[in-house]
Amino acid sequence: MSSSINAMTPLVGQTPLCRIGAPFAPSGRGFWAKLEGANPGGLKDRAALHIVERARARGDLRPGATIVESTSGTFGLGLALAGITYGHPVTVVTDPGMEAIIQTLLGSYGVRVEMVTRAHPDGGWQQARLDRVAQLLAAEPGSYCPGQYDNPDNVEAYSGLADELHRHLGRVDVLVCSVGTGGHSAGVSRRLRRRDPALRLVGVDAVGSAIFGQPARSRLMRGLGSSIHPRNVDHDAFDEVHWVAPHEAVWASRTLAQTHYATGGWSVGAVSVVAAWCARTAPPGTRVVAIFPDGPARYYTTVFDDAYCAEHRLLDRPPNDEPDEIKEPGEAEVTRWTRMVMR
């Protein structure tokens, strides 16, 4: 087992930074993108490995016990890596929105994939998945659920990412993060603020997500947003939040591909819309950093598929130059890029 651990854990972390400029920002402006897609499975490799390590150290996860978790994709890939590394079978519960390539990859890594077929009437697909996780845990005594939405180890896992940013950039003035489970936005900002309490944290949510007080609606975008309220989301840490619509994320992801090669899917596109605006409007010299959670590969049937995007009216609809503004979540139900200042 030790040789497996030594061979695999160095694959995670020390991901590159890329400077994103025109056409997202004018000459002399831009933002830094932390390319977490360079990890084997993406950003959540960090969290999956750390959560499993801590659970084993505490005795919550016994040697050889099964790991059972809900995922839309990226965390499942991280758990596959953790399961192979530490010798645990893994079962993930997902829904029909998971891309076929992710299902196939998980199966090739030895992961058992459970598919729910009906959304929960209130909590949507996420609650339906969590209900199935509870059933599977009850059926297999000794199995373990990482609980990525509520487990504080998920937050702690991203301290290393913050240290990498500090080591390479020195100072971060504005941090832009997509928000789903809330793990990396809380973990990275908390660590960076130990060095610079003035750091501004900007959250990026999906139109139709309930995380910041909007009504939960059906969502095309995967990997950010939620129909439930994860406890790991540190609402008090955010200076502002932006909601982004699918067509705006598609425009940004495709434009990134054409101009910078460094690109990704829904979360990367949404984060880029907001980080670019921060770079354009902040005082000169402001250092803006965005976390890109993954790369483009899994989105070849959605974000980068012309037929899919045409069917859902996602093509050739760039975001406005400025976001709409609301003062509190109940003021209006947002349908496109919208900003709300928290403090």
Image (spheres, rainbow, N blue to C red):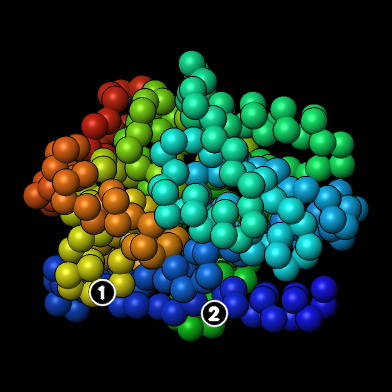
Q: Nearer the viewer, mark 1 or mark 2?
A: 1
Tag count = 2
Above or below — where is 226 with respect to 198? above
For marks 1 and 2, the one nearer the N-term is 2
Q: Which residue appears farthest toward the left when viewing the image?
A: 316
Give the residue at mark 2: 14
Identify the image quadrant of the C terminus.
top left
For residue 74, above or below residue 342: below
- Mark 2: secondary structure: loop
Query: In front here: 38 or 321?
Result: 38
Whole-percent x, y for residue 16 in the image:
44, 79
Q: Residue at x 16, y 51 (%)?
A: 306
Q: Using a 10 Å C-alpha cutoff, classify the residue at mark 1 as few (fewer than 14 neighbours), some (14 to 19) or many (20 or more).
A: few
Name the residue nearer the viewer: 217 or 242.
217
The disc placed on residue 19 is none
**Mark 2 crowdedness (10 Å alpha carbons): few <14, some 14-19, many ≥20:** some
Counting from the top left corner in percent of width and height, residue 7 is at 69, 81
Left or right position of 298 against 168: left
Q: Which residue is mark 1?
A: 261
Instruction: Confirm whether residue 23 shows in the render.
Output: yes
Give residue 125's position: percent from left, percent from top: 49, 29
92 left or right of 99 in image:
right
Residue 76 location, x and y as percent?
58, 52
Q: Quadrant of residue 19?
A: bottom left
Q: Is residue 330 above or below residue 166?
A: above
